[in-house]
Image: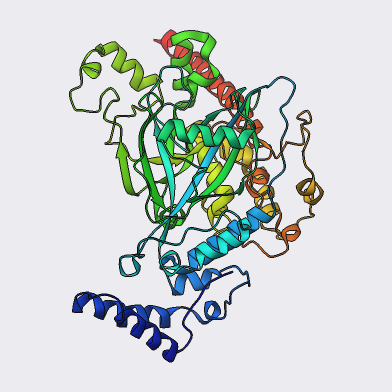
Amino acid sequence: MTVEICGDTKACGNRANAVRDQPYVSPIVDFLRTYIIYDLHRAVPASLQSIRPGFTTGVSNTDLMEFPGPGPLNAALHHALLSLHQHPYPHVSNPPNCKKRGAVSLILRVRPDYLNWPGSPVLIPDRSISVDQQLNLFFSQDWVQYGDPEVLFIKRASRVGDRWTGHVALPGGMKDPDDRDDQAAAIREAEEEIGLDLVAKECIYVSNLPERLVTASWGSVPLLILCPFIFLWTSNYTPPLKLQPTEVASVHWVSLRALLSPSLRTVEYVNTSERYAKRGGFVARLTNRFMTGMMEFSAIKLVPTESLYCSLIPGFLPGDIHQKSLSLFQRLKARCLSDQASSSDKSRPLLLWGLTLGILADFLEMLPPHNMVELWTYPTFTSLDLRLIVKMLTYGLRKRNILKVKAADFANETSTEIQAAETPFTEIDSNHDLNRVEISGMGVGRYYGPPSTDMDNSTRHAVGIMLTGYYDRLWLSVYVCLAWRVTLGAITTLYAWRWLRRR
C-alpha cells in the first residue's frame, strides 16, 4: 500500500516549511496548514505509521475508532480495491429459461478535505501502467489520503410497470445485443443515464463484484443475471452530470463513512402484494395486503454530500398538474396498494435497501468496522401474528445460519472457481444456490470480516449463508398464518352463533 505518513516531528516540520514556500496565502490558512495538519499526523495510530510504499495491509476496527476521520478508511479502501482487482469474481452464465443480463456501475471518488485541497492540476495515473500501479499512485497523494471517499447513487424516475421505479440504485441497465460484454453495457448505461464517461483518462476500471441471478416471486421466477462493476474517478473535479429525464430523477454522492455508520441503519416498508398476486386483480391484492401487511427490509438512510435533481420530471415543482389530475380513488389505491414512491417526492428520506443494498454489502463488508452483515436484519412482515409466526418458524434456521457465518474457518468451496474463466449455471436445487438472490433480498458476499492477504482464506458467502432457506420459511409462515386465521375465524363464528342461539 502506498501511504506516506509523517512518523516523527522533524519530518512534519520539514513538511510545514515546504508549505510556507508556496505562493502567498493568508496567515490563518498558513497557521491551519502548519500546526493543525501536524497534529493530525501525530494522531495517526502507531499501527498505521509503519505502512510503507509497496506494502499492503488492512486496517483494524481499533484504528478506526482511535482516528475516526477518513484516513484509515482510505487505507482500507486502497487495500480492498487492490484485492478485488487481483482476484476478480467468476462469470455466471444464464440459466436456460433466462436470457437477460444487466450491468450496474459502483462509481467511487474522493472528495478533498478543506485543509488538504489539491493543487491544479492533480496527478492523473498513466493508463500505460498496470491497474495496481495506478491505484498505488492515486492513493499516495495527500489530498486522497485525507479526503472523504464517496459512492454515486441515482434515484430512478417514476415509470408505470417498472419494478424499480422511484428506487435508489446504481447507474446501469440491461445489456443490449450491440454491447461487447457486460462491462461495456455498464459503461454505456452510465453515459446514457448520467452523462459520465467511464472510459475517460480520469477513470480506472477496478474489478467486478459477485454476479447474481435475480429472481422474482420469492425465487420462483428468474429475471436476469446482474453484473456489478467498480470504477474509481481519480480527479478532484467531476464533470457536470447530464441526467436522462425518463430514467433518472436525481443523483446523490454519499460518503462511505455514512454507509458504514450504524446510526443510519433503518428499515424500509414495502407492499409486496402486487408482486405475487398480479393475476388476482384489485380484490386479491387488497386481500393479500390485509393478510400480510407491509414487508419490512433492512435499509440504510442516505445522507448525501452532493445532490443533483432533474427538473424535467413530472411533479418536480409543488402543485404540478400531473399530481392534481389523480382522482381521490386513484390516490387511495396508490397509497393502499402501491409501493412505488414518486421520484419527485423529496419529503421521503433516501433509503438504500433490497438488491442495491445487497450489492453494496458485498463491498462494504471489506471495509472497517466490517459490520455490514452484523447490522443487517432479516426480512419480515408488519402484521403482528404473521411476524410472530415468522420469528418462531425461522428461529432455529437463523441461529444455525448465523453460527455458520461466525465460524470464521469455512472450507474454501470457491477457490477453484475464482481461478476459472467461467462458472456455468446449474439448476437450482434444495441446497440453495449462493449466486441466487430475491429481488427484494440481500446479495451474495464473498468477504466476512477483514480481507486478508490470502484470498483463499478470506472467501466467505456471508449473506448468502444467512439467507439459506429463509424465503422458503417465509412462504411456510404465510400458509401457517392463513390456517391460523381461518381456524380462529371459524371458532369465533361458532361461539358467536351459539351465543346468539341462547338469546
Q: Is residue 114 above or below residue 313?
A: below
User: From the image, which quarter does the N terminus lie in?
Assistant: bottom right
Q: Which residue is the extreme one toward the right?
A: 416
Residue 159 found in image quarter:
top left
Q: Is residue 81 visible?
A: yes
Q: Which residue is the extreme one toward the bottom?
A: 10
Q: Is residue 248 above or below residue 353?
A: above
Tell me the residue at 41%/80% (across/down). 41
Q: Position of residue 135 (x, y in %)?
A: 56, 60
Q: Is residue 25 above or below residue 91?
A: below
User: From the image, which quarter does the C terminus lie in?
Assistant: top left
Q: Position of residue 17 (x, y in %)?
A: 34, 85
Tell me the residue at 59%/74% (across/down). 53
Name the side, left or right, on which 97 lies relative to 318.
Answer: right
Identify the coloring. rainbow
Q: Position of residue 119 (x, y in %)?
A: 35, 65
Tell me the residue at 39%/49% (across/down). 254
Q: Is residue 388 visible?
A: no
Q: Is residue 147 above or below residue 386?
A: below
> Considering depth in this image, is 494 or 234 the residue closer to the camera?
234
Tell me the residue at 35%/16% (across/down). 333
> Considering depth in this image, is 251 or 217 the residue closer to the camera?
251
Name the side, left or right, on which 126 lies relative to 319.
Answer: right
Q: Position of residue 55 (x, y in %)?
A: 63, 72
Residue 429 found in image quarter:
top right
Q: How many numbered circles are shown?
A: 0
